Amino acid sequence: MIKSSVEKIAGVIGFEIGASDDIVQADLINGFCAGLHNTNRDKRLLETQISYIVDKLDKKSEFILLELVEFIKVKNKNVY
C-alpha cells in the first residue's frame, strides 16, 4: 500500500494537535470520526475497522479515549 504524505506523519500531526487548543483538537477528532464513519457505512465493516484500531492503541490513547467517552456520557445525560 502506498502511503500518502499525511499518513506518513499522522502521529506527528496528532502529537502537535494534542498540544493545541480545544477547538483544533475537536476539529481533528470530528474530522477523523467523519472520515471513518463515511468510509465504513456498513455497521459490521465499521465495527471491524474500530476493532483493528483499538488493537493498535497504546495506553495513553486508551486513557484519553475512555475519558472522552465519560465526558460525552455526562454531557448527553444532562441534555436529555
Image: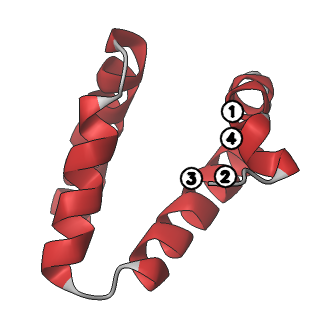
Query: Which numbered disc flags the more N-terminal residue, 1 or 2?
Result: 1
Q: Is residue 66 left or right of residue 6?
A: left
Q: Residues within 10 Å of mark 3 (few under 14, many from 20)?
A: few
Camera-near label (1 vs 4) is 1
Q: Establish if 60 lies above or below 65.
A: above
Q: Residue at x 26, y 37 (%)?
A: 54
Q: Nearer the viewer, residue 23 or 29?
A: 29
**Quarter of the image where the C terminus is located:** bottom left
Residue type for callout 3:
Ile
* Residue tagged 3: 29
Rendered location of residue 65, percent (x, y): 34, 34
Q: Pointer 4: what residue? A: 22
x and y percentages locating residue 59 in the rendered image = 32, 11
| Three-letter amino acid code of the residue under disc 2 | Leu
Residue depicted at x 31% and y 19%: 63
In the structure shown, which secondary structural element does the residue marked by tag 4 occupy? helix
Q: Is residue 34 left or right of residue 2?
A: left
Q: Is mark 1 in CB contact (under 8 Å) with mark 2? A: yes
Few, some or many C-alpha atoms within 10 Å of disc 1 (few <14, some 14-19, many ≥20)? some
Question: Which of the numbered marks, if any, corresponds to residue 14?
Answer: 1
Locate residue 46, reporting x and y percent: 26, 70
Vertical placement of residue 46 versus 7, above or below: below
Q: Pointer 2: what residue?
A: 28
Q: Which percent across, then down, holds residue 43?
A: 17, 80
Which quadrant of the figure has residue 12? top right
